[in-house]
Image (spheres, grey):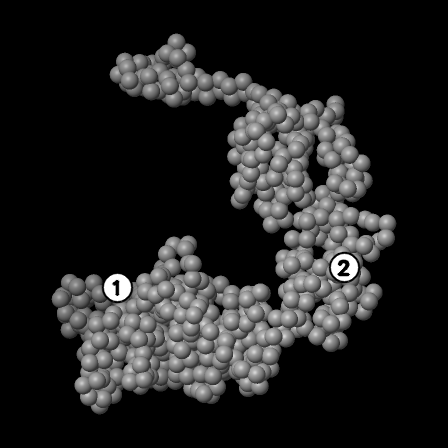
Amino acid sequence: MPDLLIELFSEEIPARMQSRAAEDLKKLMTDGLVEAGLTYSGAAALSTPRRLTLTVEGLLAASPATREERRGPRSDAPEKAIEGFLRGAGVTREQCEVREEKKGAVLYAVIERPGRPASEIVAEVLERTIRNFPWPKSMRWGAGSLRWVRPLHRILCLMTTEAGAEVVPLDIDGIGAGDVTEGHRFLGNGAFSVTSFEDYEAKLKRAKVVLNPVERSETIWHDATNRAFAAGLDVVEDRGLLDEVAGLVEWPVVLMGDIGEAFLGLPPEVLQTSMKEHQKFFSVKNPTSGRIEKFITVANVETADDGATILAGNQKVLSARLSDAKFFWENDLRVARQEGLETWTAKLSNVTFHNKLGSQKDRIDRIAALAREIAPTVGADAALAEQAARVAKADLSSEMVYEFPELQGLMGRYYADAAGLPSEVAAACQEHYSPLGPSDDVPSAPVSVAVSLADKLDTLTGFWAIDEKPTGSKDPYALRRAALGVIRLVLANGLRLHLDRLFDAQLLRHLLGETEDTGTLFDMLAGHGFHAELEAEVARLGPTGADWMTKARASGASALSDDLVAFLHDRLKVHLRDEGIRHDVIDAVLAMPNRDDLLLVVNRAKALSDFLGTEDGTNLVQGFKRANNILTQAEEKDGVEYSFGADVKFAEDPAEKALFTALDRAESAISPAMQAEDFAAAMEAMAALRAPIDAFFEAVQVNTDNQILRRNRLNLLSRIRTICLQVADLTRLDG
């Protein structure tokens, strides 16, 4: 069984495309080979900046011959039906067999396909793969029609058996397949031929090419950490940068250089970001002080002076880059200290957040108002929360963040400290963007939590107000991420918030606008939502309040708020599913009151999930569903509601009397437990019903002929339903 080796040799492939391209080459080739009848035992794809390589082991030498019988229409069928069958089978009428069956003579096409040599199939599949390769971007060169990410120079396509190596005949736009490749652009010794993958890999290594990208990454990290360790320093780990640099070199040579003394005072994040983004350098820090003191660069060549010339050139370019960063830093510090962050915030009135949602300054004003309202519920000082919200995005106007947008928030913290603002305000400048994803840290400082929540709630309500909701896989404004951020902030900090009321108030800020006269009304709405309590408070404001209330109800904010709460619940289901809580358990607790209180919902869901994980829990739910089904069917049949009047004096069977006693005991325990939100105690009390309910159904016939007993027993089932539904809507559970 031959082994296949393919190499597509070109000009430099962008580092970000190499890994995906190698996998695409493997998939397209192996799928094509298997489809043509060539199976294999193993395959691997590798890449360097100038080549994509595929090795396939244990390939069949030829595709097997196949014989297929295809049943057609009757021999006397209409001519068009017969022609369609013949065309689909690829045969003529004379090549078909006529076989007698019960319903008459039927045409059968016997299709025999001889096996084909592997080299012929490989050539076809490889040409198709090259011509249809899914590069994100590709180009043409010269006069040919072939497209590739960069000009393609060589195609190596070799099949190796015990008898030797054979080149697969192939020519694509004048590029003929061969057994020749090249080593390193500068350190290699020109072209050379190979006979197998092992020979290919070994000769590339001698020609200063490390074929495996994982090996290149490991070499870079090993050499970098060793150099840093020898100097008593640590390399700042950056997996993404390591993968990128490994895609830029074929023969990694690690060098460590110095950062000019004038730049060591820059914040470490500024140094790290500047070196990473502009130079692809790794940062090297002092483990004692945390200061970035050196850098690691990875060259693609070995030099006689051990990289001294390379380092000198890199340090010269780096000094120019860091001079810019130093200028930005010092100029921003001057503005922060002398003019304050409010100067930058004012400039954001000229920066559009969204054409339907106003400027960044408009958004800041809304966030500040909401942060002040949220502050008491999260244990934050209202004045500090509002102050933090007003300066949290000020650094967007700074020169440093304009140059390095990824530093937003972090630079705000530095500038807030420099301006002498309270430490809580400075922390909120950085932390209010978090959490950005499922693994990001969640802020815990009260002021940071208030501003972060206000920021995300304003984003969600704003885009809901202008009907820009996520659809399918499209979420251009990252609203799902904002919703998950709200959920994690609430749960991680144990917050009790009525989100529908906050949504109501913030949606109206978007829909109706806010003035000095309406600020009090928004505060009322955030405290009550669209409820009777709000009506009573607004009524005291006279005609102004009544007019505002009319506009508020006509705006549709209440319906939008309900829709937004439902969106949050969908995100909550995804979040809790990762924690092992079933979707139907969440549905069962979402049917209960106060479903916008996410912490309450989660506590109920966890208690119910734990309860259902026990034998008593599972059996009780089955007993509840049996009772509910019997009761529902009886109510539909009789046209009445059996919801009261169960009397123990009509109980005949001891199991029936025992159930009355058990229900009285459970009801007296469940109601206070639910009021105290002691869900575990409520579930425990409900679990005690399992045995009495089981015994009741074993001993008693509910739909007896005695109508007095039947009605009493149906009313007893109604008590079971009512008591159990205090804990959760068990009808929504699966099974």
Q: Residue 656's spot in the image, x, y percent?
A: 27, 75
Q: Secondary structure at mark 2?
A: helix
Question: Which image quarter is the N terminus in?
Answer: top right
Q: Is residue 104 left or right of residue 373?
A: left
Q: In front: 732, or 468?
A: 468
Q: Are marks 1 and 2 in contact (CB under 8 Å)?
A: no
Q: Residue furthest top?
A: 94
Mark 1 crowd level (few <14, some 14–19, many ≥20, 10 Å Cα): some
**Residue at the location (82% across, 67% down)?**
231
**Residue at the location (69% across, 63% down)?**
320
Mark 2 crowd level (few <14, some 14–19, many ≥20, 10 Å Cα): many
Q: Amino acid at mark 1?
A: Asn
Q: Quadrant of residue 234?
A: bottom right
Question: Which image quarter is the C terminus in?
Answer: bottom left
Q: Is residue 195 left or right of residue 641?
A: right
Q: Quadrant of residue 584?
A: bottom left
Q: Nearer the viewer, mark 1 or mark 2?
A: 2
* Vertical position of residue 282 compared to residue 216: above or below: below
**Mark 1 sits on what residue?**
629
* Vertical position of residue 143 compared to residue 410: above or below: above
Q: In front: 439, or 702?
A: 439
Q: Residue furthest bottom?
A: 540
Residue 691: tell me if it is visible: no
Residue 332: tell me if it is visible: yes
Q: Residue 362's spot in the image, x, y percent?
A: 39, 74
Instruction: Tell me the distance, in whole angstroms, between the alpha carbons under discs 1 and 2.
Output: 70 Å
**Residue at the location (75% across, 68% down)?**
260
**Mark 2 sits on what residue?**
224
Q: Residue 57's spot in the image, x, y percent?
A: 67, 34
Q: In front: 457, or 278?
A: 278
